Image (cartoon, rainbow, N blue to C red):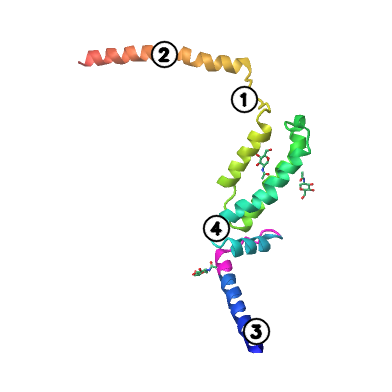
Amino acid sequence: MKNTLGFWGIVLFLIFNFSYGNRTTAGCGYTSDNCENICDICDRFFFDQRIRCYELLITETCFKPFNTSMSTLNTKDFCQWNSIKSPYDNFTICTEERADCLLIPWPNKLVESMFVEIHSNYFKSCPTQGLDDPPPSIVFALVMTPICLIPVMVVLVVMKTKNGDRRS
Ligand SMILES: *[C@@H]1O[C@H](CO)[C@@H](O)[C@H](O)[C@H]1NC(C)=O
Ligand SMILES: *[C@@H]1O[C@H](CO)[C@@H](O)[C@H](O)[C@H]1NC(C)=O
Ligand SMILES: *[C@@H]1O[C@H](CO)[C@@H](O)[C@H](O)[C@H]1NC(C)=O
């Protein structure tokens, strides 16, 4: 009985070491306190698919808390930078920290698509200064520039044609 336990102990030890060896080859950022745990969990349960682990991790630990803190806000505060700054910054820091741990580039496609989702969920109807409503002088300049260019183009074309005629 004692021998059997010893045998399984060695087997478990070898298995543990084996997966541990793979873990270290994948690398870990060690940029924040939680890094070691994050790398460990990801490499233990997802093996080579760190990006899948990252997706699950930031959905659960960054996106959901963001949603929760947004749900405590009044809808009319969504467009007030002061009230959304804290959850927004936390989401940014949260996704960046976990990416740094797992040696995933940041910003990445996953985070970008989450930002897009966040914007379309919460900030879609917020006015964007300067985009919705440019001052009249800019509109005037934008409209007039091509119109003023037309005579110039005509003159250029005429001159080109004349030059061509002379040469032939
Ligand atoms: C660990 O790495 C070895 C060789 O690189 C590979 O054959 C093995 O499948 C890996 N084990 C796990 C659990 O990913
Ligand atoms: C966050 O909330 C939006 C709608 O408010 C929902 O579409 C999205 O699935 C939620 N995401 C998470 C991770 O809970
Ligand atoms: C953002 O993070 C800070 C520090 O971790 C915390 O004090 C604050 O409550 C968080 N804010 C939100 C909205 O989660």
Q: Amino acid at mark 4?
A: Gln
Quarter residue 164 falls in? top left
Quarter residue 9 falls in? bottom right
Quick check: 151 above or below 96? above
Range of residues picked out in magenta: 22-32
Quarter residue 14 falls in? bottom right
Q: Amino acid at mark 1?
A: Leu
> Which residue was labeled with disc 1?
131
**Residue at coordinates 28% horizontally, 12% vertically from top-left?**
162
Distance in Å between CA atoms under marks 4 and 1: 41 Å
Mark 2 or mark 1: which comes first in sequence?
A: 1
Which type of secondary structure does the marked residue at label 2 adopt?
helix
Instruction: Residue at the far left: name it.
Output: 168
Distance in Å between CA atoms under marks 4 and 3: 34 Å
Q: Which label number is shown at residue 152? A: 2
- Mark 4, other Cα within 10 Å: few <14 / some 14–19 / many ≥20: few
> Which residue was labeled with disc 3?
5
Which type of secondary structure does the marked residue at label 3 adopt?
helix
**Residue at coordinates 67% horizontally, 32% vertically from top-left?**
123
Q: Residue 119: horizontal and vertical position, in percent? A: 64, 35
- Mark 1, other Cα within 10 Å: few <14 / some 14–19 / many ≥20: few
**Residue at coordinates 50% horizontally, 16% vertically from top-left?**
145
